[in-house]
Amino acid sequence: MAKQVFINLAVKDLQQSMNFYSALGFTNNPQFSDDSGKCMVWSENIFVMLLTHEKFAGFATKPIADTKSSLAGLYSLSVASVEEMNQIVANGLEAGGVEPSELRDYGFMQQRTIEDFDGHTWEIFYMDMSKIPAE
């Protein structure tokens, strides 16, 4: 079996969150979804599990963080072009997300940030490997 990444996020409104992640370009895998959790697929090996607070708490060993006021993690997704990055963020904003900071341009990498309804922070970036500075 290939190595896979599953990111589990506690969300307050499961359907609203599913709609937001669909707007970013994730697809739903109904095989691993039910009324308390939705499996959202980014790629063959990367998945985001959107879980109600009740379901998430069943796995947690600590209280659920208030990600609207505190940063619990930064999740980054690479894309194939600046245009794709801009389109994903535009779709997320249209679906109700928030862009908390301006585009960052590092020369070899451009990055934009978007937050979902619960404050989970995603960095969408494009990296041009040919522009990485030589050491």
Image (cartoon, grey):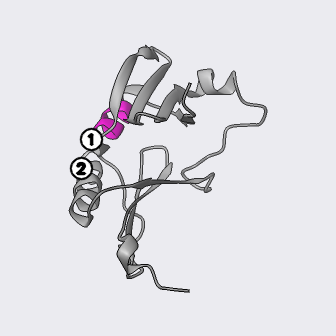
Residue 24 lies in quadrant: top left
- CB within 8 Å, label 1 to label 2: yes
Q: Position of residue 20 (x, y in %)?
A: 33, 39
Residue 8 appears left or right of 117: right
Q: Mark 2 points at which residue?
A: 91
Residue 45 part of the magenta-drawn span: no
| Three-letter code, disc 1 | Ala
Give the overall secondary structure of the magenta segment.
helix
User: Against 40, is 108 above or below?
Assistant: below
Q: Position of residue 41 (x, y in %)?
A: 40, 32
Q: How far apart are marks 1 and 2 (CA)?
A: 6 Å
Residue 74 lies in quadrant: bottom right
Label 1 neighbour load within 10 Å: few <14, some 14-19, many 20+: many
Residue 37 appears left or right of 43: right
Q: Name the residue under label 1.
A: 23
What residue sits 66% from the left and 44% below the top?
Answer: 65
Label 2 neighbour load within 10 Å: few <14, some 14-19, many 20+: some
